[in-house]
Amino acid sequence: MLFSFLILLILINYVISKTATIKKTTSSMNIQHKIGQMGQLDIGLFMKPDRTVDYDMMWSWFDSYKTGSVLDAPTSVGPFDDGNSGWNATEWRQLINTMQSISMQTTGIPILYGLDSIHGATYVKGATLFPAQLNIAATFNPEHARITGEITSKDTRAAGIQWLFSPVQGLALHPAWARFHETFGEDPHLAAMMGAAMIDGIQTEGDVGYPTKAAACMKHFIGYSQPYSGKWCSDVMLMLMCYCCRYCYYYCLYL
């Protein structure tokens, strides 16, 4: 009982100290700084024609606009000119460490970097890749989804990235939709179960002696996967009853 009480006091003290730090930081920010922290830039903005990073330009943007986060991979639009398909974990960490240093010197706040690690850390060269989410759902095995999330998170963290745009929680309701295979299928019960398991894997620290968990960010907007025409990024007609039956109940139940 005494031990539990001491642990509770330590946790309360930790939360209070972190809250004080956050309040101190935000109180020193002007409106420009706060707006900048809500902005997110694509890493492609800082890539030179030779596909190296323009750190001088990064410094200028961070200093001028107080940028809060960056996303994407330099090879999201295709491989490098030499055919290289991307950066390995060491090369990613060089980018992230330099970016963090620039952010701390220009904004005083660490940068958030997000990456689409959907079925494995697909933008980290040498990482473990998994089947698309539709295939994972076909196993009807939430433990498989959990392990996928755990390994994906571990490989992404090895690259110095702590924020995963994963899992995809849209429902595959239109067979013509281009991102059909990225989902856990059409059934909201199964999709919610598999999604909850994958998030648990991403956000649970592994017992390996080094950080492996990351922040999961399920996506996309509700209804995004249900376009009226079936075309990507087109109009959606989402009835209230459809919203309640297909999304609210199961997603609130599991997620």
Image: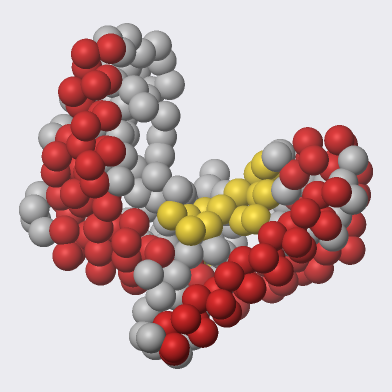
164 with respect to 200 (left or right): right
Query: Residue 198's x, y, as percent?
Result: 29, 58
Q: Position of residue 160 (x, y in %)?
A: 59, 70
Q: Is residue 129 visible?
A: no
x then y, percent, for residue 217 = 45, 48
The answer to whether residue 36 is seen in the rendering is: yes
Residue 91, compared with residue 115, is above or below; it is: below
Q: Position of residue 79 (x, y in %)?
A: 53, 54
Q: Residue at x 13, y 35 (%)?
A: 187
Q: Quadrant of residue 233?
A: top left
> Which quadrant of the figure contains the N terminus?
bottom left
> Which residue shows up at 32% across the image and 9% down it?
237
Quadrant of the image occupied by residue 53: bottom right
Query: In screen coordinates, is 190 left or right of 36?
Result: left
- What residue is at 40 percent from the left and 39 percent from the top? 219
In the image, farthest residue toward the front: 2
Q: Residue at point 37% right, 70% down?
A: 204
Q: Nearer the viewer, residue 33 or 112?
A: 33
In the rendered image of this protein, does residue 90 appear above or below residue 145? below
